[in-house]
Image (spheres, rainbow, N blue to C red):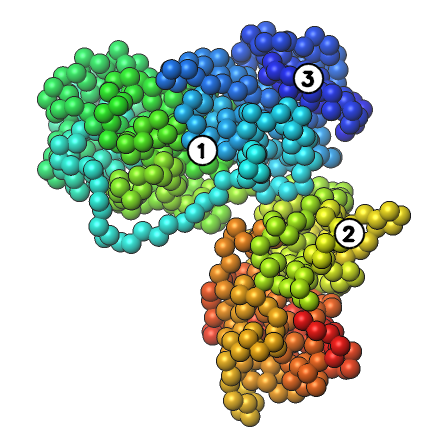
Amino acid sequence: MPATHITLVANDGSELTTQLLQQLEKGGQRAVVLNLPHIQNPITERAVTLAAASDEAVRKALETIQAQYGTVGSFIHLHPHFEFQQGNFTQHFPAEREIVKILFFLAKHLQKPLNALGRQQRASFLAVTRLDGQLGQGKRGNVSIIGGGVPGLVKCLNLEWPSVFCRALDIQPELPAKEIVAQILAELQDADASYVEVAFSEEGRKTTTVQPVAVAEHSEIRTRVTSDSVFLVSGGARGVTASCVIEMAKVFQCKFILLGRSSSNFEVPAYAKAEQEEGALKRLIMEDMKAKGEKPNLATVKSTYSHIVAKKEIDDTIARIKGFGGQAVYVQGDVTAPSSFRPALNAATAALGKITGILHGAGRLADKYIQDKTEADFEHVLSVKLDGLLALLQSVDIHQLDHLILFSSVAGFYGNVGQTDYAIANEILSKAAHLFKTNHPNTQVSAINWGAWDSGMVSGELKAQFEAAGVTLVNSEGGAAMLVNELNVAYADQPQAIIGGTLPAAVSYISEDLRTYRIHRHLALKANPFLNHHVIQGNAVLPVVNAVGWMAHTCEKAYPDFSIFKVENTRLFKGIVFDGTQKEDYIIELKEVEKSPEQIVFETTVLSEGEKLPTYHYKATVTLLNRKTDRKAPKFAHQLSGTYQPTSGAGLYEDGSLFHGHYFQGIEQILDCTESQIVLSCKAPEVPLSEQGQFPVGSVNTFFTDIQYQGMVVWVQKFMDGAKSLPLQTDSAVIYQPIPFGKELFVHVKIAEATDFKMVAECTVYDAEGAVYMVTKGATVTVSKQLVW
C-alpha cells in the first residue's frame, strides 16, 4: 500500500480489535481506528470517534481521518457479536441496526478512495461478522440477526466496485482472537475473487452454494394448508404477491387477510372501469376534471391514476380469490406500524378465524449506486422488510403458526448493482427464517429468494439486459405455482430457497499493469479422498491432470467472469507422491503475460520451498477467455478401421492394464485400436464434491481428462510389448465446453509418434452429434518396460 494510504479498522469494542491492530502494524501496515458511537473500550491512539450514526457524521469522520492520517486504502469492519436472552430476539436490534447503518454510509464515502487505489493496486473492503461461523445457518437459537444483512451489502459492493477486493467473513465467535485475526489477514490476501462470502469455524472454511432441485410439473403436493388456514399477507393485494395468493386460493381454497397501504374506500369512476391502458386512462381523468371545471395538473392526474389502479387491482385480487373458492378481507395500514391496522385486523380475524400463517411480501426499492444513497433510502427500504416482519409477528401468536413465508430476493443472495440497502434487508429476512425455524421447528418456514419477475416491474430494456446476461426471469404463472410447491411438507426443513434465475455476475477489473500472484496451499492426503483412487506402487499420486486443473482453475478465480480456454506447454518436473516424505506446503505462482478485456494469459508454476532452492513440480501457460466469447467449437467424426472387434473397457481395470480406482474408471468400450489410433467410448463416473477435496471440478473435468491419457496407456501396452506409461507433458489443450459427469462421450487418440521412450498423440473428446468438447495436441506419455503399478 502506498505510504499515503492507511488501513481503517472499525472497532468492535473487544480484544479482537487490539490484536488485529498489532498484527497489521507488525506486517508494516499503518492502521487507524474508527470508534463507533457507544462502543465499549474505545481506542484513543491513532483513532477517531464517530459522533453519531448518520451519513453526515460518517462523512466528517472520514474527512478527519484523511486530514490527520492519510487516505483509506483498506477497510476492515469488525461487527460485534450479539446474543439475545430469554427469547427476546429484538433485544439488540437498535444497537445493531445503528452499526449496520454506519457501515452502509462508510461504504458510501469510501467508494471514491478505494476505487481510485484499486485501479492501481489492491484495495480492499472486508466486513467481519461473528454470527456463528456458518453465515447464520448454524441453528443457534439466540444469535441476533441484523448483522446477517452485512454480506448482502458486501456482495452488492463487489458488483459496483470491480476494482476493489470485497469480502464478507463470518467467524465462529468462540474461536480465540488470535485465530480470528490470522483468518482475517488470510482473507485480506486471498487471490480468489470468485468467493465474496466466506464462513470460518472449527469445522473449517466454507461458503454457501446452491443445490438445484428439479420440480416435476403437476407433482402431488402434501401440505398442512387447508381451507381453514388463514394467512396474514403484507403487500398481498397487488403485484407479485397477489399472483401468489390467487394461486394459493386456486389450489387450497384458504383464507387471506390482505394488508396494504392503498385505500380501499376509493370509488373507481364509471369512465375508468373498462379502461386499462395508462395513457388513455390519464386522458379520461383530465377530461373528467375539465368537465367538473377543474384545471388538470400533473400531480393530481398522477395521484388519481394511482388510486384508480390500486383499487382496481385490490378488487380484482379479492374477486379472483373468491372465484376460486377462497375468502379474503382487505385491511388498510402501514405494515411497519401495527397500531395503524390492529383494529381492522382484529375485525378480520373475528370474521375469518385465527391466523395460522404469515406471508410477508411487502417491499420497497430505492435503486441507486451506493455513493448516491441517502438516509431516507436506507431507512425506507430496510423498514418495510424488517419492521414489517416484526409488526406481523407481533400481531399473531407465533407459537401457533403453521407457516411463515418471507419474500426475500436473489439481490441479497448474489448481490445486485444499485440495491445495497435492499440486499441488506433481504439477507436479514433470510437469516430470520433460519433463526425462526431453529426456535419453532413445528412451523414450516421459507425465505424465498426470488429472482426477477417478468412483470410490469421489468421494462423491455431491462428484460433485454437480463437476457444478454443469461438471467432467467420468473413468469407470473410459473412463479406463483412454485410458491405453492414450497408449501409442500417435503421442504419443511429447508428455511431458504431460491426460485428463478441468478442476477448478472461481477465484471472483473482489467488493470493496465501485468500482475503476479503467489498463492500458498497446504496439501493433505486426508483432505483429498479421490487420491485413494489414484495409487501407484502403494502410494497415492496426484494426477498430472489435477495439477493442471489446479493451475488453470486458480487463474479463473482471479478473474471470475473469465473461463479456461487453452492450456499450453504443460510440463511435469517432479510429481507429488504421498509417500510420507512429500512436502505439505506448496506455492502456485501466476504471472500475467498478456491481458485484455477479451483474453488473459498466465504463466503458471507449482513449486515447494527447499532448504536452499525451490523444487519445481509443474508448469503451464493458461489462457482465459471472457465468458461472453463465442468459442466456435468444431465438429468431429471418427472413422473406424473395421478390423477391430469392440471390447469392454471394464476388464482394463480388473486385469492390471490400468491401475485406476473407481473415480477414474471411465473407459466403457474400446471401439477401435490400430497402430494409428485408438477410439474409446467413455463416461466419467460421478465423483461427490466432498470426495474431490482441494481439487473440485470446474471448467475442466480433470477426472475425464485423465481418461483420455488412459487410452494412450492402453495403446502403448498393446503395441509396445506390454510397456507401461505415465503422462509426461502436453503441448496444448483447448477446452470448448465443460465435460459433465455421467455423459457418454468419445475419445479419439491419433498416434503422432511412438518410440522406445515416449508416445505422442492428439486427443479429441466429442459427443454422438460430433460436438467437440476438448482437443489435446502433443499429449506425451513415457514408455517403460520397467515401470510397475
| Residue 133 location (% of width, % of height) | 53, 31
Q: Does the residue at mark 2 contact the one at mark 3 (Cβ under 8 Å)?
A: no
- Image position of 738 (left or right of 337): right
The answer to the question of whether label 1 and label 3 lie on touching residues, with beta carbons closer than 8 A, is no
The residue wearing badge 2 is 607
Q: What residue type is labelled 2?
A: Leu
Residue bearing mark 3: 18
Which of the 4 image quadrants contains residue 139? top left
In the rendered view, tell whether residue 457 sits above or below residue 562. Answer: above
- Counting residues from the start of the chain, the first of labels 2 and 1 encountered is 1
Q: Which of marks 2 and 3 is nearer the N terminus?
A: 3
The quarter in which the C terminus is drawn is bottom right
Depicted 178 relative to depicted 647: above or below: above
Q: How far apart are marks 2 and 1 (CA)?
A: 38 Å
Crowding around mark 1 (Cα neighbors within 10 Å: few <14, some 14 to 19, many 20+) is: many
Residue count near mark 2 (Cα–Cα under 10 Å), binned few <14, some 14–19, many ≥20:
many
Q: Can residue 339 be seen in this view?
A: yes
Measuring 79% from the left and 61% from the top, which residue is drawn there? 573
Which amino acid lies under the numbered mark 1 shown in the image of this protein? Gln
- Determine the residue positioned at 54% across, 60% down: 738
**Residue sitting at 74 percent across and 20 percent down?**
22
What secondary structure is found at the residue carrying circle 3? Answer: helix
Determine which residue is flagged by label 1: 137
Residue 291, visible in the rendered structure: no
SS class, disc 1: loop
Q: Residue 154 carries which label?
A: none
| Kind of residue indicated by mark 3 | Thr
